[in-house]
Image (cartoon, coloured by chain):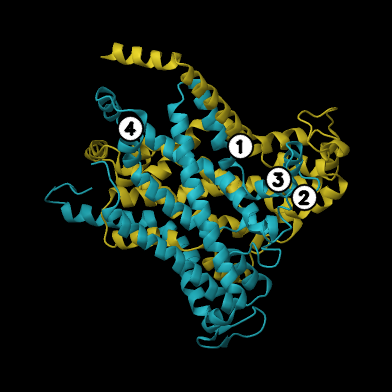
Amino acid sequence: MEKVKKAPASGKRLKRIEGVTGWLMITPALILFLGFVLYPAIRTFGLSFFDWDLLTDKEYVGFENFGKLFTDERLGTIIGNTLLLTAVSVVLKVALGFLLAYFVFRLQNKAGSVFMESAIFFPIIIPMSIISMVFVILFSTDTGAINGILYMIGLPKVPWLSSASMALWSVLIVDVWKGLGFFFIIYLVAIRNIPQSYLEAADIDGAGNAKKLFGIILPCVSATSLFLVINALITCLQLFEPVYLLTRGGPGDSSNVISYYIWSVAFQERDIGYGSVLALVLFVFVMLVTIAQFAISKFWVHYDE
Amino acid sequence: MNKTLALRKRHWKLRPSGLLWGALKFLLAFVVACIMLYPFWWMLTGAFKSALEISELPPTFFPREPTLENFDVIFGQADVFGQMYINSIIIAIAVPLLQTIVCLPAAYAFAKLRFPGKNIVFMAFMGSMMLPGQLTIITNNITMVDLKLVNNLMSVILLSIFSAFAIFMMKQYFMNLPKDLDDAAKIDGCSIWGAFLFVDVPLAMPIVSVNLILCFNSAWGGFFLPMIFLRKMEVMTVPLGMTVLQGAYNTESKAVLVAALMLSIVPVVIIFFLFRKQLIAGIATSGLKV
């Protein structure tokens, strides 16, 4: 990229052609980006200063919509749910994903590990919406298969979706079950990519499995872990489909999360102004996570080379 | 040294605790596989169960008397479900193709060409990955109303074409391609477009196909955009349509609903079995290039 040819005579002309071609090549993407990403982001920010229901005329209200953030009694619960769900989901996905990847990595049986790989990976490719609808049936208190199995092994029935204390955890179960494969597969590839020489050297030094795990494998996947944690935080903060399809945020607000709340404010109640403010709040959360990523990766992570 | 290692390994395997460990490992693998696969097994077999059997608790493992009546019900009202299937296929084919046409040249330009403003545009693209869909959708909804594209598949397609992630992934791939080939092509009198189309694109086919597959998958399963823009039954996609049809199917029988849900994932399952390796590689590379 750096060494554009130094053909002295036509150098300038070539450079101009390259510049024009470069812009031509990015133009279609740039138009879509400007029209459907940048413009809406800015416009939504602007709309947060208006009172508007899409039908009547907009009315400029200054910071009134932002003020609602502090008087909205539902918001505390909803942000609390979002953060709780995100935290637990990230810990579970990263921990289970790593343990399963390490487990499959250690399997000596080739067929067995291919089978396990596919089994854990499989839910990734199935649409979240379909999975949620399947789980609605499975979670049913009286006729659902999950309670049926619990009953078979002598456990009491659980009102998965209809009780305020369980609804959020049911959403979490679906999210972890569906998302686990991504964490698993990325950890598995990261562990398999550790140079064989490291592990062989440890073998020769007589290091046990525990020592190899804590001394080599875990440090070598720290960059992957950071990426996964950040990725999980960002996607989980925006979790929408399972909440919409499993519980509609209920009962009450017991399983309501910020992205579902934004949708219900902006599209059901048609309160565009306040919906925009809430969307900005979500954006700030995501941005904080991303900034934290850059800060952490500077001193915490071991990058190979 | 290898010999002693092998010996040590065998010795370890023969110990009774080794046997116990082996059994535990098998048990763990079995439990994990059951948890991950059971819902799919339940779905697959449920589609062939009778209305009565599907509600039995605990669920039967195999359908006692496999029946096709559920599918008869679905295809009996084929017009709705069939139309939704066609809509989903249109979106799932149009989006990957258009995304490749739009994002591949951009990725190439960012990777291989020098032009003023390149870094700013690239940073803006990457930064946009931070924007939640809920933020842009509020205005995009208004835009689509203005463009009269509500209840038109184009709304979903237009909003799905641009992908900062696809550009990033393909750019990384182009940057790792050897530069000599480009230079050789240019010396032979190839233009930039020529080098792009005839030298680099063929070399980039692995990543292009990975992106096509990932994009097909997410376009088929997309829910949020169709939910906002496709409000009439006849323009809905399958996953969205299922939320509307589930009530009607459910009153028929839960087995009918299960059969319809199973039909709705057939394309992605076929893609999985055809392209398992590419899918896993694609998702893995998306994670590894931090």
Residue ID for mark 1: B36
Amino acid residing under circle 1: Met
Q: Do labels 2 and 3 share a chain?
A: no
Numbered disc 3: secondary structure? helix
Instruction: Give me the chain letter of mark 4.
Output: A
Tell me residue A227's x, y (percent).
39, 49
Which disc is residue A141 wearing?
2
Circle 3 Cα neighbour tier, 10 Å, few/some/many (<14 / 14–19 / ≥20) = many
Specify the colour of chain A: cyan
**A141 w.r.t. B73: above or below:** below
Amino acid residing under circle 3: Tyr
Residue ID for mark 3: B85
* Foreground label between 1 and 2: 2
Numbered disc 2: secondary structure? loop
Q: Are marks 4 and 3 on the same chain?
A: no
Amino acid residing under circle 4: Lys
**B101 w.r.t. B16: above or below:** below
The CA span between labels 4 and 2 is: 45 Å
